[in-house]
Image (cartoon, rainbow, N blue to C red):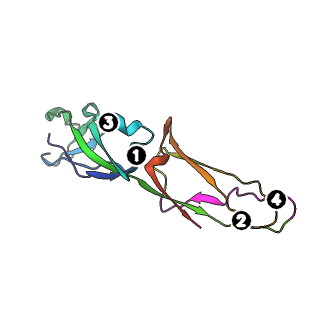
Amino acid sequence: LEIELVTKINTYGNDLVFDFPNLVNGDRVDEVSYDYAQNYYTDNPFGESDTFKTSAILDTSTFKIIDSENVDVTYCYVIQENTFDIEIKKRRLDIVVENSHKDYDGHELSTEGNTFVSDSTPLATGDNISINYNTSFSEVGTHSITDTVKITNGEYDRTNFYDINYIV
């Protein structure tokens, strides 16, 4: 079975797209899974760049090929292990920050609920974000707020896999 990687440059979190040009009789691949080379599972494979090179390794044991009548015909094909060189780009993430203000009453201003991820640039599936602030202002005036953003996926820190932009 000939397998081609369509997306040779891929944004972090997007699925890779494969093509199978020599399937016959209306057969189609129903299931494909893959894993990445070890450098994908480090905290910052990007270094100072916006992209990094890695490999995608197809898991041929999970392939399922079905015919036009949804019958499994995987056994009719010889499927070989394939490794594809790819380039991963950082995923854009817009964090929307709404201004917070209040009349002075002696109690500190909270930024809780005033920051969120834009719907137009969602996190990759399985990623979680935490945003912490250095806010404990109770004095009158204008104050800058510094945040700390951390994005994780299981045990892996994925913060460096994002191009984070703030929209005020």
Q: Which residues are magenta?
A: 105-121
Measure the C-alpha gap from mark 3 to mark 2: 44 Å
Q: Position of residue 163 (x, y in %)?
A: 46, 56
Looking at the rendered structure, which numbered label has been put on residue 37?
Answer: 3
Please identify the quarter of the rendering in which residue 144 is found.
bottom right
Mark 2 vs mark 1: in front? 1
Looking at the rendered structure, which numbered label has been put on residue 138?
Answer: 4
Whichever of callouts 3 and 4 sits on the residue coming sooner in the sequence is 3
Q: Position of residue 79 (x, y in %)?
A: 17, 34
Looking at the rendered structure, which numbered label has been put on residue 164?
Answer: none
Looking at the rendered structure, which numbered label has been put on residue 47?
Answer: 1
Looking at the figure, which quarter contains the N terminus?
top left
Left or right: 59 in relation to 98: left
Q: Residue at x 68, y 57 (%)?
A: 113
- Residue carrying label 2: 100
Q: How many marks?
A: 4
